[in-house]
Amino acid sequence: MAKFVTIGYGDQDGYDRTDAAVRNDAHAHDARLLEAGAVTGIAGSPVQVRNHGGAGMTVESGSFMFSALPVAGFSIIEAATLEEAVELVAKTPCAVAQGVVEVWPLQESP
């Protein structure tokens, strides 16, 4: 099975506007993904780390990338294909509650 990194984007307003039954189904789906071995987490506050040329580390608060919606969380899931991974995340809270989920194939380092 291949591994995929997923990044969920969404905000409280979109979540609140989504029917409670739809949200509950999405949370139940997340619970099934966890039972199947997915690793998930809610996004905290990021920092940027640089060590250009190995000359010294700098750390700055805040994200490097910007989007219309804040990052809500991350997962690592397993699926046979990208299409299967997309089907799995299509039922998660960020996907159904007015947000978006990116799916990135994870190519492991040698």
Image: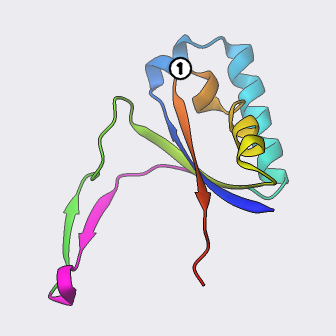
Left or right of 108? Residue 98 is left
Picture coordinates of residue 8 (x, y %)? Answer: 53, 40
Picture coordinates of residue 3 (x, y %)? Answer: 70, 61
Picture coordinates of residue 50 (x, y %)? Answer: 23, 73
- Please state which of residues 45 and 58 is positioned toward the viewer in this rendering: 58
The local secondary structure at tag 1 comes to loop
Quick one: quadrant of the C terminus?
bottom right
Total marks placed: 1
* Residue in the picture at 84% in, 54% down: 36
- Please state which of residues 24 and 104 is positioned toward the viewer in this rendering: 104
Per the image, the residue denoted by label 1 is 98
Q: Is residue 63 above or below residue 101?
A: below
* The magenta stretch spans residue 51: yes
Quick one: quadrant of the N terminus?
bottom right
- Please state which of residues 49 and 16 is positioned toward the viewer in this rendering: 49
Q: Is residue 13 visible?
A: yes
* Residue in the picture at 69% in, 31% down: 90
Left or right of 3? Residue 107 is left
Q: Few, some or many C-alpha atoms within 10 Å of disc 1 (few <14, some 14-19, many ≥20)?
A: some
State the image quarter where residue 56 is shown. bottom left
Q: Is residue 56 above or below residue 71?
A: below
* Residue in the picture at 79% in, 59% down: 37
Picture coordinates of residue 74 (x, y %)? Answer: 55, 50
* The magenta stretch spans residue 45: yes
> Label 1 amino acid?
Gln
* Residue in the picture at 39% in, 36% down: 70
Find the magenta span and give its range.
40-55
